[in-house]
Every structure is written in structure tokens, then in C-alpha cells.
Amino acid sequence: MVKVKTKLVSWDEIVSWSYGLALKIKESGYKPDIVIAVARGGYVPARLICDFLGVENLVSIQSQHWTEAAKKAERAIIKFQYRIDLSGMKALLVDDIVDTGESLMLARDFILREWKPKELRIAALQWISPVAKFKPDYYYMEVKEWTWFQYPWTRLEDTIQFMRRMLLEEGKTKKEWSYKDITGKFMEWYGIDVGELYFKSALEYLVKEGLLRKVCEDKYVLAK
Ligand code: ADP
């Protein structure tokens, strides 16, 4: 039984979804003078949209969610608050996904206030409509049931986190693991196969971190 609804996204899908998104923008008649990528998730789609729409100007803004452990309150912040002048320009803000949409809203407000474009529209590949706090002007796919999109640009990061979560839970009853045990359980939990390069790199990371100990060629022991 899959524990976390996850969709493994391929590079080919990214190209075709970005193309579809660019087409929607084109059909609406909006011709942006500049594209703004939201770092880090918006980089690849933003670059592809520039290509498909023939936009030469591309900048980025980094909006990130912080968890303040002490307060247990989450807030997003704009990192590197540089100022540029976009007056007279039509801008397009691009991100991979609108989940809660909080970091994107923060970026939008910052840009409108500090960079002052003539117009700003928002585009994302995915829009998770039941949880999003706003609807982007353009989206390629409306997602009605919350899903984790495992994009190719966060594959290692996600694999490490997914594997850690799974091992901490399953490790309560099973201490010794082979490579096959780990990857098999991973696929059972998440329903995706990220491939050997990512599985092995994530394992290496978790060994370095101290969660796992490699006792012989194909035997890992949970250290905690
Ligand atoms: P929040 O601000 O609550 O973290 P956002 O909707 O603003 O949520 O998303 C911030 C970034 O986190 C996204 O641009 C994306 O890179 C990543 N992200 C959030 N939700 C998902 C998801 N369901 N699948 C994949 N990536 C996600």
C-alpha cells in the first residue's frame, strides 16, 4: 500500500507540460517582456517557457518557507532582496507548483511593491486547487487530490527525505537492511522507482549522516 501519493515526473513530461503551459499563455494574448523564475522550483519551467515564447529576459527571485521550530509557526521569506526596475514591463512569474501558494504570494507582493512591473501574471505547471490559497493566471494541470510531484530537479533531495522517513518508521521493527530491502520498501511506500543512481546516492548520504551503518557490502544497520 502506497503511503504518500507521489507522482514521478520525467524530464520529457516537464518539456511537454511547459510547452502546454506556454501555449495557454500565448493563446491568452499575453506577451511578457520578462520572465521571473521562482527559485528554486521555477527555474526549469521558466527557462523552457522563455524558449517556447521567445522571451529573452529572465531573472529570478528566491522565496522560501521557513519553519520556526521554536514558535511552530511557518513563514515564507524573500532571500536576497535586490531591487530592479521593471516599470513599463509586462512580467510573468513562473513556479513549478502552487501547493499552499504562500511562497508564491510573497514573491508576487514583493515584486509588485519593489520592482513595479506594468503588469504581473503568474504561471505554474501544477495547481493543487483544494489547498491553494489562490489560483494562478495560468496552470497546465489542476490537481484535485493532493500529490507530491517528484520533479527531476529535486530527485536526490526527495529520495533522501523519503528514505529517511521510511527507515525511521520501519526501523522500529527491522534493524538490518539489504539494498533490495530498502529499495523494495521505498517503492512500496511511495510507489515510485527513482533508479539506482538516486537510490545509491541517497544511501551514501544517510550513511554519512549516521542514520545507517554499512556493515558489509550489502548490509546496512540502523544506527538509531
Ligand atoms: P509553501 O509555500 O507552503 O511551501 P508553495 O505552494 O508555495 O508551498 O510551494 C513552495 C515550493 O515547494 C514549490 O514551488 C515546490 O518547489 C515545492 N512544493 C510544494 N508542494 C509540492 C508538491 N506537492 N509537490 C512537489 N513540490 C512541492
Image (cartoon, rainbow, N blue to C red):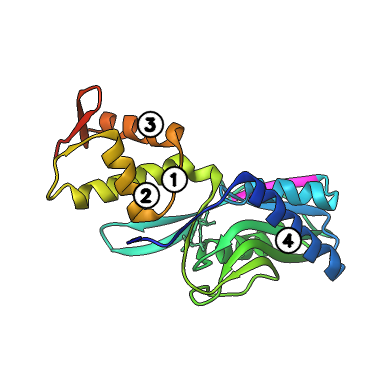
Q: From the image, which quarter does the C terminus lie in?
A: top left
Q: From the image, which quarter does the N terminus lie in?
A: bottom left
Label 3: state its secondary structure: helix
Between disc 4 and disc 2, the foreground one is: 2
Q: Residue at x 48, y 43 (%)?
A: 155
How much space separates mark 3 and mark 4, taking CA atoms?
34 Å
Label 4 within 8 A of ligand 1 by Cβ: no
How much space separates mark 4 and mark 2, taking CA atoms?
30 Å
Amino acid under disc 2: Met
How much space separates mark 3 and mark 1, taking CA atoms?
12 Å
Q: Residue at x 36, y 42 (%)?
A: 160
Determine which quarter of the picture holds residue 189: bottom left
* Residue 222 seen in the figure: yes
Asked if residue 211 is positioned above or below residue 86 in the image, the reply reads: above
Determine which quarter of the picture holds residue 25: bottom right
How much space separates mark 2 and mark 3, taking CA atoms?
14 Å
How much space separates mark 1 and mark 4, taking CA atoms?
27 Å
Between disc 1 and disc 4, the foreground one is: 1
How much space separates mark 1 and mark 2, taking CA atoms?
6 Å
Check if mark 1's residue and mark 2's residue have beta carbons within 8 Å.
yes
Amino acid under disc 4: Leu
Label 2 within 8 A of ligand 1 by Cβ: no
Q: Position of residue 118 (x, y in %)?
A: 80, 65
Secondary structure, magenta segment, majority class: strand
Write down the region rendered in magenta.
57-61
Check if mark 1's residue and mark 4's residue have beta carbons within 8 Å.
no
Amino acid under disc 3: Lys
Check if mark 2's residue and mark 3's residue have beta carbons within 8 Å.
no
Residue annotated with mark 1: 193
Residue annotated with mark 2: 187
Label 3 within 8 A of ligand 1 by Cβ: no
Label 4: state its secondary structure: helix
